[in-house]
Image (cartoon, grey):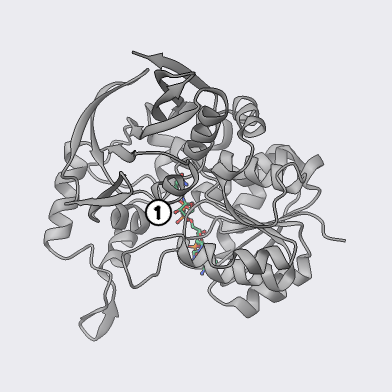
Amino acid sequence: MKKGILIIGAGGVSSVAVHKCAISINIFEKITLASRTIKKCQDIKKTIFDKYQVDINIEQIDANDINQLVVLINKINPKVVLNLALPYQDLDIMDACIKCKVDYIDTANYEHPNEAKFEYKLQWDRHEQFKNNSIQALLGSGFDPGVTGVFCAYAKKHYFDEIHYIDILDCNAGDHGYAFATNFNPEINLREVSANGRYWQEGKWITTKPLEIKIKWDYPEIGVKDSYLLYHEELESLSKNIKGVKRIRFFMTFSQSYITHMNCLQNIGMLGINKINHKGIDIIPIEFLSTLLPNPSSLASKTKGKTNIGCVIEGIKNGIKKKIYIYNVCNHEECFKEVGSQAISYTTGVPAFIGAKLVYQDIWNKKGVYNIEQFDPDVFMEELNIQGLPWKIKVLD
Ligand code: NDP
């Protein structure tokens, strides 16, 4: 009989999810953590044992190798696989789950390593295979994508007859003391921010230059911040799944220092994703840059301040126009105290754990490939309040 959870990847997000799963070991029964660098698994294993006396299993795996994945999944025989490696591994891990008939969860959509483009298409294309094998894939169970989709589904269920406008507003006002560092995987972060912006309006995608559109937004518990329009992956699924939406945009805050550094790195070619030859050795500039930048998990003990991520949603209820703001505020230092991580890893790892818990317990049980906003939001919203990411709703004028 299938039993336990297999978590793939042992970075910042995974560490938080493993903490939360270990606290809920009575639900997950058995935890296996597998990643490319076994030392990172060993470190997490030790921390978890010292803190909770829960002994997790660890394994070494190259998740780019589907044969290795199939052997590992068959050996562990887990009930769910939680993919917290990088978006490049999504398809291989999904295919291994199909072969082994096991449920799949992730937090980021597939991205091709050699092309700065991410989209759900190749993951959605696997819907019939998941369905025919009576298994489910829950896509995007992080914060954004993730909680932002749950916020939209909750608003649709309880506050609106029709949703017309959605703005997702993501602010990290944490200060780690470095002139430049990224708060999650540097390669994924810089590829996302340096790309063209894009938003959905009246059935069409509108493309903007990188960071071309800027608004000011007053984030509760933080204050007014410049917020830049980016393309973000949940726009693709929400524009499809929130029927009748006329416009949906995503904004993120960046400090002037971050933007100046990023532009400079872009201008000199350090964000390049194609191989270049340096003194006889092939290197990919953005990978080399990732090696130089601080490891995001090393920022945890130094970061002070808060994050605020939420959705401003406008629409109609009982014939009357209405606008609400649903958001969560998370404190970097409190996250560090609880699980030794900064808030970006925390706000992703906790929803990943909640999604895994709902799938593990068959509370969310749809056969096929689904995005998070396609599930009933109520139980997830309750869990957010219990598991450390409480939310608030404000009615706006
Ligand atoms: P990290 O870089 O800290 O961790 C990634 C982990 O995956 C590392 O342990 C890495 O191994 C492992 N890994 C990479 N390639 C392979 C491979 N081929 N086989 C096995 N393991 C591999 O990233 P984060 O923890 O910051 O992010 C994890 C995921 O969460 C990413 O997909 C990211 O996009 C997503 N994310 C989602 C967010 C959301 O809100 N939805 C927000 C933030 C992140 P090694 O130690 O050897 O490098």
Image position of 186 (left or right of 258): right
Count of residue discs: 1
- At label 1, the amino acid type is Asn
Identity of the residue drawn at 76% across and 57% down: 79
Q: Nearer the viewer, residue 69 or 99?
A: 99
Residue that numbered label 1 is attached to: 185
Work out whether 26 lies above or below 369: above
Q: Where's residue 198, x and y in %?
A: 27, 50
Identity of the residue drawn at 19% across and 51% down: 210
Q: Where's residue 156, x and y in %?
A: 52, 30
Element assignment for label 1? loop
Instruction: Residue lying at the far right in this picture: please name it.
Output: 1
Q: Nearer the viewer, residue 43 or 215?
A: 215
Q: Is mark 1 within 8 Å of ligand 1?
A: yes
Q: Nearer the viewer, residue 311 or 32?
A: 311
Q: Nearer the viewer, residue 251 or 58?
A: 251
- Give the class, few, some or many, for how many residues have Cα within 10 Å of label 1's Cα (few <14, many ≥20): some
Identity of the residue drawn at 16% across and 52% down: 209
In the rendered image, which quarter is residue 229 located in? Answer: top left
Instruction: Residue lying at the far front in this picture: please name it.
Output: 319
Image position of 333 (left or right of 269): right
The quarter of the image holding the N terminus is: bottom right
Q: Where's residue 243, x and y in %?
A: 47, 41
Q: Is residue 227 visible?
A: yes
Identity of the residue drawn at 77% across and 42% down: 25
In the rendered image, which quarter is residue 191 located in? Answer: bottom left
Work out whether 145 lies above or below 165: below
The quarter of the image holding the C terminus is: top left
Work out whether 30 lies above or below 251: below
Q: Is residue 309 visible?
A: no
